[in-house]
Image (tube, rainbow, N blue to C red):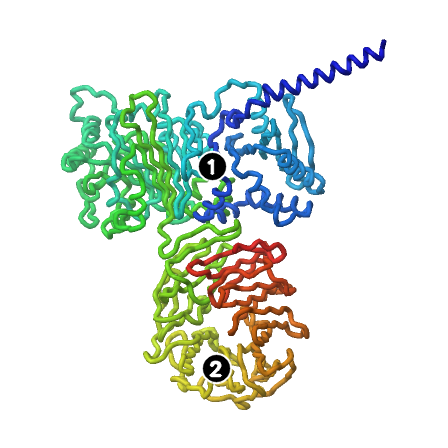
Amino acid sequence: MSRKLLAFLTALLVLLALATFVYYRRTLAAVPVDPYALVPADAVFVLSTRDHPALVRHLQETELWDNLTAVRYFQQAAGHLALADSLTGGNARRRNGLLTLLGRKLVLTSVHVTGPGEYGVLYQVPLAKVGEYRQVRGLLETLGRDARYRLATRDYEDQEFTVLTERRSETTLTVFNYRNHLLVSATPALVEAAARRLAHVGAPTVLAAIGSTDLLPLRGVDATLLVNYRRLPQFLDVLFRPDAHGQFDQLAGLVSRGLLGLKLAGSRAQLQGFSNPETAQGALQQRLRGQPVQPLGLADLLSTRTALLLHLAACPARTWPGPARPRPDSLARGAALDSLRATFGGEMAVGYLAAPAAGSRPARLAFVRCPAPARTARWLARLRRLDGTSPAFTRVGPYQVHPVGFPEAAVLGPLLDPAPPYAVEARPGACVLVGNYLVLADALVLNGYLADVVAGRTWAQTPSQVAFLQETLPRARLSIFVDTRNSWNALLGALTEERRAGLLRNEALFKRFPQVALQLVPAHNEAAPGARYFTQLLLRHPDPGPAQARAGAAANGRVLAFRRPLVGAPTLLPAAGTRVPAAVVQDSANVLHFVSADNTVRWSDTLAGPAVGVGPLAGSGLLVGAGFRLHLFANDGQEVLPFPLNLPDSVRLAALVAGPGNGPNEAARLLAVTTGNTLLLLDARGRLFPGWQPKRLEFPLAGRPALLSVSGRDVVLVPLQNGYVYAFNGQGTLFPGFPLSMGARLAGEVLAQAGSTLGRTRFMLVNQHGELVTFTLSGDILSRRRVATWSRTARFRLVPDQRGRSFVVAREDGNRLDVYLPGRVAPLLTQRFVTSGSKPVQFFDFGGSRQVVALTEPGPGQVFVYGNTGRLLGGAALPSTGTGIGLTHDATTDTYQLVRAVGRELRRTELRINQVVVQK
């Protein structure tokens, strides 16, 4: 009997389990998870993304990808992922695992204020497959097994959280898996708040005030941003000092919540959508309801030094009515102020000028439109008489600056009551009528501002600013314009101490879009049910000019497309404050372009011919030779005097070599090689040396000459193709022992090692018998040894590295090319080509084992890049139509920056030699 009972109970339990499973599948699991229902209600921003491959591609096009990945938060996350990948033996296919995991899923990122001066971020990622859950779980368990991390679980309101802790910093990452919907945050309170919402199924979500409108499916929309304007003042308290954002707190009273769609394209990021009007009593929206929108009429009046402009379509007298006054007081000061306010129109603005130094006080200007300026001037004069103010004024150009005895807020309302950042001590106020606008500020600020207006340094006279205004909305109730470059110093002072260091680290990201505009336009009929504000936030980078940024084929690549094909090889220059180098390239129309580290063309200049000898000149600028001129360009692309230096019109430059002067006060030496096989020696001040006007050689040069200074004497060493080497001094006469025979014909460069004396100065080159010859300036041959096997058809070249300190030897025989390292018998690499003709060889030596050899094949337009072990990087040739590539190395990250020309495109690729992911 007991056995039958046991069997019955077992069957009953199985049936109950089966019924529970069916119930779960048919009821709970059948209802999809609403990710917005899990977002805590106090979210300030909620970012929704879906097509993540397209989002990354557009971030690259707008140059934001490199700036975002340089942020410390993203670098730390990437470090954790890279560590987990290395612990699990990750391969190239899994390195893009995060992007593959996100795919085209709806991912939410919400930002919350979690305490005084603190904010947190909550991520939501749906898991569509069991394999994805295992991938995430395996990642956490792998990190948990590492000694640097600790993995644990804890229960919270019948839910299980997984907690990953970094032992060194004790920072935690809390993970909550709710029905294969992953919630991740470094702030445990946010995950707990999301779990608590599970007990309130019918509670309104963060989208309740927005309704069913969804902007994410619209064409071209990369993401949507939900904004809770009521929480903005609280969020601004986290970033800024409490007295620095009082005006923004008032302006946030126009709207309550909004939904914006993000579009990334080229040099701009645009967010467009709608915002709900604020319904709270006493908010700014209640005061402005019904007032017409206004265009920005201040373009002719705004200085190019403007850092921030708050433009409001509001009539001060209507928006903030003054107190009622008794009739007998009609001529008193208060009534005069009311009469002055009655002359104002429906447009006012507050502007801040660029602060002169970090942390200094930004100057403030108040603008208000005056439809009848003469009437406004009469009431200003009456107020001066009532206040006993002197009628004297100062003149700046055609404008008269008068003192005033009332504060700005007395006539323009409480928008000017909050103390501005770095509120200045009380100074005598002043005003000036400029056209149809009254401008109020202190006298010193007005004088400097009017000097800009008189000189034409205004927005209306600046092409980039005019183009920016043409892309903004023509009319709005509220417009906030920000110049991120002009506002940098003031922002450093307005931020809290904790956030200032973060801003300094991410300066490039903040300044990526110098022009920013936020605009709110009310509905035509504000009284209609459901009327909303049209909202636009525009972030714009000025027109890059002759080139347009494009996305690379990989996340580590950037592309800049020019209008014409690029020629020659890119020259890389170090850029301050970044590991990414600047580049100098030339197109087929002989236009030289300077491409900054952020992949924008800073300046361009048309030259008289192909550029030669491109490189820095002793910190003075960029040295370039073209046609019959020598140029020295400053950072802004302007010539540094006394450049350009003009050579005889009959010569054409074939090469240009720069060398040091013979002392600290001596100008750098310049050696010009012409196509007519002549040499000219001059210095950077334009002084020609006697005996070099010009010096004609009997045979063509084998390679570029060497120019150096030894014991206070100028030395010019010239290898010729006939096998002889000539060494000249500054007067153009030969050194004793020269010309010196190398025993066979010559081709390729010469490696110079300057010494303290002529006898200690050594040179090395390779002759066409395959011999490496070392000799001194005394005319003595120190050594001669064979590098490789000689044949009648073989051609040998010595290839110095980018700094001229080490070298390799290239042996070219038919369609085979061998590269030898010094001291090795076997070649480092051997490459066979389909095409015939000479193949440019480049050698890069960054110290230790960080050596790279690049072989360019001009016919098919490709380059083979080899490491120091002779392994072909990437496993295949890369497209390259130039005569060479540019390569730099950053020791802090052990990464390389590869720059090459492909047709009209300048392609940059960041790679690691041991972990190569190369963009084709």
Q: Which amino acid does label 1 sit on?
A: Leu
Q: Do the residues labelled 1 and 2 touch (CB within 8 Å)?
A: no
Residue name at image x 69 percent, y 45 percent: 88
Within-10-Å neighbours for mark 2: few <14, some 14–19, many 20+: many
Between tags 1 and 2, which lies in front?
2
In this rendering, would 327 be left or right of 647? Answer: left
Residue name at image x 58 percent, y 45 percent: 96
| Nearer the observer, 100 or 472 | 100
**Which quadrant holds the N terminus?**
top right
Q: Position of residue 516 (x, y in %)?
A: 37, 42
Name the image quarter holding residue 546: bottom left
Q: Where is residue 353 in the image (x, y as percent from the top left)?
A: 33, 44
Within-10-Å neighbours for mark 1: few <14, some 14–19, many 20+: many
Q: How many marks?
A: 2
In this rendering, would 535 be left or right of 728? Answer: left
In this rendering, would 775 be left or right of 496? Answer: right
First in sequence: mark 1 vs mark 2: 1
Please give the label number shown on residue 253.
Answer: none
| Nearer the observer, 407 or 801 | 801
Q: What element carries label 1?
A: helix
* Residue 74 in view (yes/no): yes
Hey, which residue is sitting farthest top in the picture? 1
Hey, which residue is sitting farthest bottom in the picture? 736
Q: Name the residue under label 1.
A: 239
Q: What element carries label 2?
A: loop
Q: What residue type is labelled 2?
A: Leu
| Nearer the observer, 852 or 173 | 852
Please determine whether, in this image, residue 556 is positioned above or below residue 474: below
Q: Name the residue under label 2.
A: 701
Q: Where is residue 467 in the image (x, y as percent from the top left)?
A: 30, 47
Q: Where is residue 408 in the image (x, y as percent from the top left)?
A: 28, 34
Please determine whether, in this image, residue 633 is positioned above or below residue 305: below
